[in-house]
Each structure stands twice: as C-alpha cells, then as structure tokens.
Image (cartoon, grey):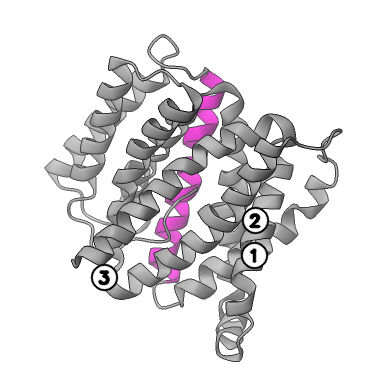
C-alpha cells in the first residue's frame, strides 16, 4: 500500500480515536440522545451534497430497506450506547472496548454466514475475551459494570451491521449506504431528542466537541474512509480498527488526564492481538464501526 494511503489510514485512526474523548466531554451537558441527534444531523449535511446527485439517488431507492436497518444498527443505536456509556467510563475504555466488534463479528458470521473458524481464530477469540474480562473489571480500570455492558452492546450492534452488510449489501455503493444511514438515523431520532433537549445552553467545549464529532469525525472522515476502500480495498482499510484504541488511550491521557494503568495496557494488547488472530482469515468487511 502506498505511503499516502497509509498516511490517510493513520489519520483516520487518529480522528476516530479522538471521537471517544469528545463524546466524554459533550455527553454530560447534552445527554446521549440529543448529542447523537446533533452529531448525525451535522454529518448528514456533509454527505447530502454528494447524495442528492441523480446517479446516487437512483441507487438510494433500490437500497432503501437496507439503509433503514443500518441507520439504526450501525449509527443511531450504537452511537447512543457509547455516548451513554461515557457517563461511567473514561474515554480510553470506550475506545478499547469498541475493538471487541471484530471478535463479535467473527462469532456472528460463524452462525449467520456459516463461515469456518480456524484454531487460530478460536485462540484469538479466547485471548480477546480474556482481555475484555480484565478491562471490564472495575478494580482494573475506570469503567462501571453498566457502562461496560452497554459498550459491548454497542459493539455488538456494529458487529451485526458488518455481517448484515456482508450478507446483503456487498454490491451496494458504500457512499450511498453510509451517507443515507446517517440521514435516516437523524430523522428517526427526532421524536426522542425532542424530549431530551438540555435545560441550559452548552459550554464552548461541548459545542466544539459536537462540531468535531459531526463534521470531522463522522462526516468528512467517513467520506475519506469510503475513498480509501475504493483505492486499496476493504480488507486493508479495515486495519484502521487497530489504531482506534491506541489513539483513544493517547488522547484521553493527554487532554483528559485519564489513567493508563498496567492492566489497561495488558487488556488492550490482549484484545488487539485477539482481534488480529480472529480476523486473520477474513476476506471482507462491512462498514467500519464507529465513532
């Protein structure tokens, strides 16, 4: 892979890794549902100029039912779950547990797609699971049991979406799939966010966090992600998942003074090594989870 594509890959990892930090900053003031509503709305505004082109509008009509499902399972629901989890967790834990998506994807694909699992993949699944057990123990890290549970539930949503895409949406234009799922995620959340409007005007830090999450981390970054898939393929692009927890730990430590204990490092390494082995034989991937 060319240096420019490696650079874009690492850049995307850095941006998506920072998303958990901004979620941690904005959620206490805005609430999980209203935060996600604003985030998806801003991201939709980034995508809409591309999506309303006649060629892509035709593709949208044919893909509507798949887009509607993914607007819930790959955007609205997991975004809310990770935002809610930030109330009881450091941002670095959100980033690390997000990596469990790959382990769950392999598990779901085994039952749903009847994919074969090798001994190496089983070893990766076990290693990753042990890493998760270490991380979700409140004695070892800064996350409570409820937040750990809904983090893993959010990762499960991403994993389901990835397998769903692999089964039903491989031939669908990814720009259409991602872009319109953001738009319909925004629309579907309107009735819920109407009852979640904050009582006070958010701080400058929360506003900047929203702008970053919506425009940069979700909008522009997903456009870059789609372009990278087109240029180097989905398999190579999927390696961005390894950078997310690394940057999540770095940004959380630098800007939020979050603790990085020995056991957090050990758990993170075990999860990432487990993910590497668990996904070593996979030749396709859905839309990246995220951010």
Q: Is residue 30 above or below residue 212?
A: above
Majority SS type along the magenta span: helix
Q: Badge 1: few (under 14), some or many (20 or more) residues near its Cα, within 10 Å?
A: many
Q: CA distance from mark 1 to mark 3?
A: 25 Å
Residue beneath the point at 36% across and 54% down: 11
SS label for mark 1: helix
Which label belongs to residue 44?
1
Q: Nearer the viewer, residue 177 or 224?
A: 224
- Whether 158 is among the magenta residues is yes
Q: Are marks 1 and 2 in contact (CB under 8 Å)?
A: yes
Identify residue for label 3: 232
Mark identifier at residue 40:
2
Quarter of the image with the N terminus is bottom left
Can the viewer see residue 183? Answer: yes
Please report whichever mark, 1 or 3, sits nearer to the chain's N-terminal start: 1
Residue 204 position in % (x across, y down): 70, 38
State the extent of the magenta-drawn residues as a range: 145-169
Q: Position of residue 165 (x, y in %)?
A: 43, 64
x and y percentages locating residue 195 in the rendered image? 85, 41
Looking at the picture, does residue 226 appear above or below residue 118? below
């Amino acid at each position: 892979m060319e240096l420019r594509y490696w650079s874009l890959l690492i850049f995307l990892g850095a941006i998506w890794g920072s998303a958990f930090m901004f979620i941690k900053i904005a959620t206490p003031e805005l609430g999980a549902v209203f935060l996600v509503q604003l985030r998806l709305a801003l991201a939709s505004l980034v995508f809409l100029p591309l999506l309303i082109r006649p060629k892509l509008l035709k593709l949208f009509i044919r893909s509507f039912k798949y887009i509607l499902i993914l607007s819930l399972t790959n955007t609205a629901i997991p975004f809310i779950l990770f935002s809610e989890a930030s109330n009881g967790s450091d941002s670095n834990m959100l980033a690390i547990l997000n990596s469990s998506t790959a382990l769950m994807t392999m598990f779901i694909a085994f039952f749903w797609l009847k994919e074969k699992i090798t001994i190496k993949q089983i070893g990766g699944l076990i290693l990753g699971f042990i890493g998760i057990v270490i991380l979700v123990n409140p004695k070892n890290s800064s996350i409570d049991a409820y937040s750990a549970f809904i983090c893993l539930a959010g990762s499960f949503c991403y994993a389901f979406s990835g397998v769903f895409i692999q089964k039903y949406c491989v031939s669908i234009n990814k720009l259409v799939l991602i872009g319109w799922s953001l738009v319909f995620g925004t629309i579907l959340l309107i009735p819920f966010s109407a009852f979640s409007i904050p009582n006070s005007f958010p701080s400058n830090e929360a506003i900047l966090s929203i702008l970053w999450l919506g425009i940069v981390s979700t909008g522009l970054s997903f456009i870059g992600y789609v372009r990278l898939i087109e240029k180097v393929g989905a398999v190579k692009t999927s390696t961005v998942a390894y950078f997310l927890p690394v940057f999540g730990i770095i940004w959380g430590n630098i800007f939020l003074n979050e603790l990085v204990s020995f056991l957090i490092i050990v758990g993170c390494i075990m999860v990432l090594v487990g993910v590497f082995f668990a996904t070593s034989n996979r030749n396709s991937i859905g839309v990246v989870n995220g951010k």
